[in-house]
Image (cartoon, rainbow, N blue to C red):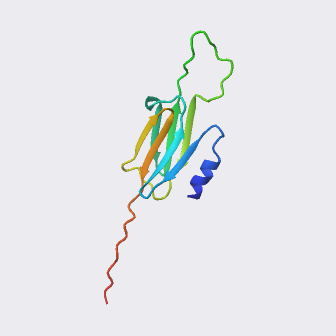
Amino acid sequence: MPRLREALGSLPDSVFVDVLESDDAYAFVVDVPGATGDTVDVRVEGRMLAVDARREKDVPAEFDYRSEGRSLFLELELPLPPDATDEGASASVEDGVLDVRLPKRGTDSHSVPIEG
């Protein structure tokens, strides 16, 4: 997973991603403040996880923007671990946090009979 570690290390300081691993899956947890399930798109493209998110501005009528510290858009591509698969993948957004679950490929090993 060196490619994934390198990609995570090169993210801008304003982008927060955690990668968790269990025996049978990976979880990518991405902060997407202000985004909702309707404004987030998650895709597996080849061996990459692609996330596009946008937040909606909600400015009270009596205020105007003077400065903005957060981007309206997030575009993120991360290489997948070698044993991750998109088959059976799921994603959810709650309170500005995106949780993407990718199962691991089967790692069952079988003995091979040897004749002779």
- 56 versus 81 height, above or below: above
Residue beneath the point at 59% across and 58% down = 2
Taking the image as shown, residue 55 lies to the left or right of residue 37, namely right
- Is residue 19 visible in the rendered image? The answer is yes
Q: How many marks?
A: 0
Image coordinates for residue 80, horizontal then vertical, percent: 50, 52
- 69 versus 78 height, above or below: above
In the rendered image, the residue lying farthest to the top is 62
Question: Of residues 21 and 9, which is closer to you in this image?
Answer: 21
Image quadrant holding the N terminus, namely bottom right
In the rendered image, the residue lying farthest to the bottom is 116
- 20 versus 111 height, above or below: above
- Is residue 79 visible in the rendered image? The answer is no
Residue beneath the point at 47% across and 48% down = 27
> Quarter-wise, where is residue 13 in the image?
top right
Image coordinates for residue 101, horizontal then vertical, percent: 43, 47
Image coordinates for residue 7, horizontal then vertical, percent: 60, 49
- 84 versus 72 height, above or below: below
Taking the image as shown, residue 106 lies to the left or right of residue 55, namely left
Image coordinates for residue 61, horizontal then vertical, percent: 57, 10
> Quarter-wise, where is residue 111 in the image?
bottom left
Image quadrant holding the C terminus, namely bottom left
